[in-house]
Amino acid sequence: MTTRIPVTLEGNLTGDPEYGAGESGNEYARFNIAVNDRRLNQSTGQWEDAGTVFHRVVVFNQQAQHVAHSLHKGDSVIVAGDLRFGTYVDEKTGQTRETRDIVADNIGASLKFANVVVNRAPKAERPAPDATGPTAAPASYAGTGIAR
């Protein structure tokens, strides 16, 4: 059983998203965000950085394409998803290491300090208005032997 830890983060991309596809064909985009904690120094009255935490984020499928085409280094984003933990063996040292990633359900550009133009992705094609579809005859006319 895995523990689901939902998180929402606001931060800045530290680099352009890496876009690719896994062995199974699933598309993904990976990127890092820096979350800065700012606090008001009561003695000076100035805002100061109180530390930066970096998070690795991965998103899948069509949203991965949108992230790769829309977001770039330095962009402010809001990420909602689940915190996932994993382990791997370091090839150089042979030691087991732990990882912490955010598997994003939803990613958006933050409008706090920027304007954004939204271009909707095209929807699936629909039939033309005058297209003919399949036709069905009532069972009594189709020779099925149903009597009324």
Image: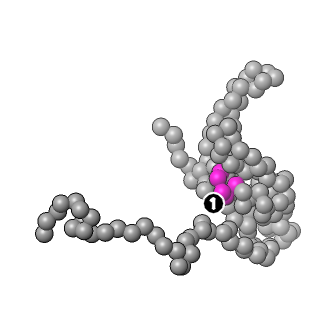
Q: Is residue 59 visible?
A: yes
Rendering coords of residue 49 (x, y %):
83, 59
Residue 54 or 52: which is nearer the viewer? 54
Q: Is residue 116 left or right of residue 104?
A: right
At x 81% / y 23%, what residue is drawn?
92
Q: Is residue 54 visible?
A: no
Total marks placed: 1
Residue 118 painted magenta: no
Which class describes the residues within 10 Å of circle 1: few (<14), some (14-19), or many (20+)? few
Residue at 54% over, 79% down: 129
Lateral position of residue 64 relative to residue 105, left or right: right
| Residue at the spot of label 1 | 106
State whether residue 128 is above or below residue 83: below
Nearest to the observer: residue 51 or residue 128: 128
x, y percentage for residue 93? 79, 21
Toward the top, the furthest residue is: 94
Q: How is the image coloured?
A: one colour
Give the residue at the far bottom of this rendering.
129
Q: Residue furthest front?
A: 143
Q: Which residues are magenta?
A: 60-64
Task: Inspect the image, locate mark 1, and give the three-letter code of the amino acid beneath it.
Answer: Asn
Q: Residue furthest left?
A: 148
By secondary structure, the bulk of the magenta-drawn segment is best described as helix
Residue ID at (80%, 73%): 113
Where residue 69 appears, as percent x and y from the top left, is: 78, 60
Q: Is residue 55 above or below residue 39?
A: above
Asked which secondary structure carries label 1, the reply is strand
